[in-house]
Amino acid sequence: MLPNIELKRLNGKTEHTHDYIGKVLLIVNVASYCGFTGQYAGLQKLYTDFQAEGFEILAFPCNQFGAQEPGTAEEILQFCSSRYAVDFPLFEKTDVNGSQTHPLFEFLKHAAPGILGTEAIKWNFTKFLVDRKGQVVRRYGSADDPASITGDLKKALAEPG
């Protein structure tokens, strides 16, 4: 089950993972200058379509892959809102690999290893679907378009908390 981990939004507000208990979550490491950055549009569509059913996207900018998220918190917020009209939660820049890995990503990687059992995240826009009970349902790679997870998302939303 998802442990209670402190999270900081780009605007400085502190939250915890347990603030999202009972919701279906898609947790994603994102970047503004990545070949997959266009996925913001698909993520926003999922959020718009399913938020009312108890769905939340938690996005964590990450600068570990090709320095593709170099901006400040304000620059990231501006980019996401002006280019993609993102209104799902954006959190502080986060390490997803290495000695400074954020505890949330330590948990996610262990709960849902990638291909051949490797826990390391390979690139930006790796996605983790978490059900209402805090169980990691599935890990999706960078190349998995947000629309492709709709079936898994609907199934998770249909299950009781």
Image (tube, rainbow, N blue to C red):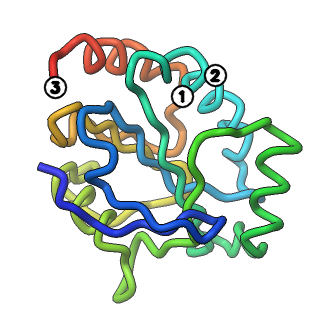
Query: Hey, what amino acid is under mark 1?
Result: Pro
Q: Report the mark closest to the observer, 2 or 3.
A: 3
Query: Hey, what amino acid is under mark 3?
Result: Gly
Q: Mark 1 highlights which residue?
A: 146
- Point 31% across, 64% down: residue: 104
Q: CA distance from mark 2 to mark 1?
A: 9 Å
Q: Earlier in the sequence, mark 1 or mark 3?
A: 1
Do residues under tags 2 and 1 come within 8 Å of each other at their CB atoms? yes
Q: CA distance from mark 2 to mark 3?
A: 23 Å
Does residue 66 appear left or right of residue 99 in this picture? right
Does residue 63 appear left or right of residue 76 in this picture? left
Q: Position of residue 20 (x, y in %)?
A: 33, 44
- Point 55% across, 23% down: residue: 46
Determine whether the residue tagged by mark 1 lies in a helix, strand or loop. Answer: helix
Q: Report the mark closest to the observer, 2 or 1.
A: 2
- Point 50% across, 72% down: residue: 94
Vertical relation: 62 (above or below) 153: below
Between 49 and 107, which is closer to the camera in this rendering? 49
Query: Hey, what amino acid is under mark 2?
Result: Lys
Q: CA distance from mark 1 to mark 3?
A: 23 Å
Does residue 81 appear left or right of residue 145 in this picture? right
When asked about the image quadrant of residue 22, the answer is: top left
Vertical relation: 117 (above or below) 41: below
Q: Mark 2 highlights which residue?
A: 45
Between 112 and 157, which is closer to the camera in this rendering? 157
Q: Mark 3 highlights which residue?
A: 161
Do residues under tags 1 and 3 come within 8 Å of each other at their CB atoms? no
